[in-house]
């Protein structure tokens, strides 16, 4: 890790939450990608129970609700995101079947075998991919699906700078083939894996952050932590531009067997 930039793990969660609450999406993705991942899932009906874990303010949850039947529970540890989530659901008149609750992904409020689908975009890294796969599995019915997006290496080897960045940020990043093998090992039949297109990062994630950075810096003028956090975020965007041939996000869809 470059010493000029503080590790993401050094920042206060409240500060990170305040910043990300100002964004429509809290991670790379797009409506098209959510719909594409959903196209692999064939078990849903009006009675289905779906969990969106690490839902943030619910950008992808609302797309899911508009394109699939059933009831969706959004789970996030950050109360401000859940407030926004529930406001968004109401604005779209989805409040009867889409509800957000504040809970941690390592303490989920579901019963064993209750869920038809577990969704999680850009969030399973908080518990770790393998741990999440293993711990969440019991909540799914047999034949239920898991669909998660996750940091992924595109190549077997990569430049030292980006390797070091990820080993600090999230050492569980791995290749598609290794992630798929982990799914299989954890008791899911791999159904699909696909790479998120670049616009999920650039147009939908980094571009809106440019303005959000300015607003956040003004709101937190003189706060050194806030300045260092924005420097960290800008550094991440620069690294993506430089090394996007080596990593990105992939969606992984598996079926509980
Ligand atoms: N799925 C959203 C948000 C991704 S960002 C999107 O794609 O836009 C990751 C999310 O995980 C954040 O909203 C963060 O608050 C949430 N999170 C982090 N740790 C968590 C935990 N232990 N339990 C539940 N949610 C958590």
Image (cartoon, rainbow, N blue to C red):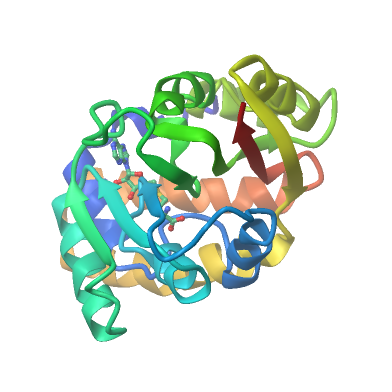
Instruction: Please give left or right for residue 135 compared with residue 203 in the image.
Output: left
Residue shown at 68%/61% (left/top)?
39
Residue shown at 50%/46% (left/top)?
122
Task: Name the one closer to the observer, 226 or 107.
Answer: 107
x, y percentage for residue 80? 16, 58
The quadrant in which the C terminus is found is: top right
Residue shown at 35%/46% (left/top)?
54
Q: Is residue 240 above or below residue 36?
A: above
Task: Name the one closer to the observer, 131 or 65.
Answer: 65
Q: Quadrant of ligand 1?
A: top left
User: Where on the picture, by quarter, is residue 111?
Assistant: top left
Instruction: Please give left or right for residue 16 compared with residue 61 in the image.
Output: left
Residue shown at 69%/26% (left/top)?
179
x, y percentage for residue 56? 33, 55
Q: Is residue 226 visible?
A: no
x, y percentage for residue 252? 66, 41
The quadrant in which the N terminus is found is: top right
Q: Is residue 20 above or below residue 119?
A: below
């Amino acid at each position: 890790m470059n010493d000029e930039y503080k590790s993401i793990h050094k920042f206060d969660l409240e500060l990170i939450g305040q910043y990300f609450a100002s964004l429509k999406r809290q991670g790379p993705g797009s409506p098209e990608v959510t719909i594409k991942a959903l196209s692999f899932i064939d078990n849903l009906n009006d009675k289905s129970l779906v969990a969106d874990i690490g839902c943030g303010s619910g950008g992808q949850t609302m797309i899911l609700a508009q394109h699939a039947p059933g009831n969706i529970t959004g789970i996030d540890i950050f109360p401000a995101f859940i407030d926004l989530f529930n406001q968004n659901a109401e604005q779209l008149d989805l409040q009867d079947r889409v509800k957000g609750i504040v809970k941690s992904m390592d303490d989920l409020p579901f019963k064993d075998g209750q869920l038809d689908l577990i969704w999680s975009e850009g969030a399973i890294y908080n518990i770790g991919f393998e741990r999440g796969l293993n711990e969440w599995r019991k909540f799914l019915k047999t034949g239920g699906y898991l669909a998660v997006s996750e940091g992924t290496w595109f190549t077997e080897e990569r430049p030292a700078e980006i390797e070091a960045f990820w080993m600090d940020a999230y050492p569980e990043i791995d290749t598609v083939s290794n992630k798929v093998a982990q799914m299989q090992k954890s008791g899911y039949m791999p159904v699909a894996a696909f790479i998120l297109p670049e616009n999920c990062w650039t147009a939908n994630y980094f571009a809106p952050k440019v303005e959000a950075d300015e607003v956040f810096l003004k709101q937190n003028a003189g706060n050194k932590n806030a300045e260092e956090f924005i420097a960290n975020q800008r550094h991440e965007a620069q690294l993506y531009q430089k090394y996007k041939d080596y990593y990105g996000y992939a969606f992984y869809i598996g079926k509980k067997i």
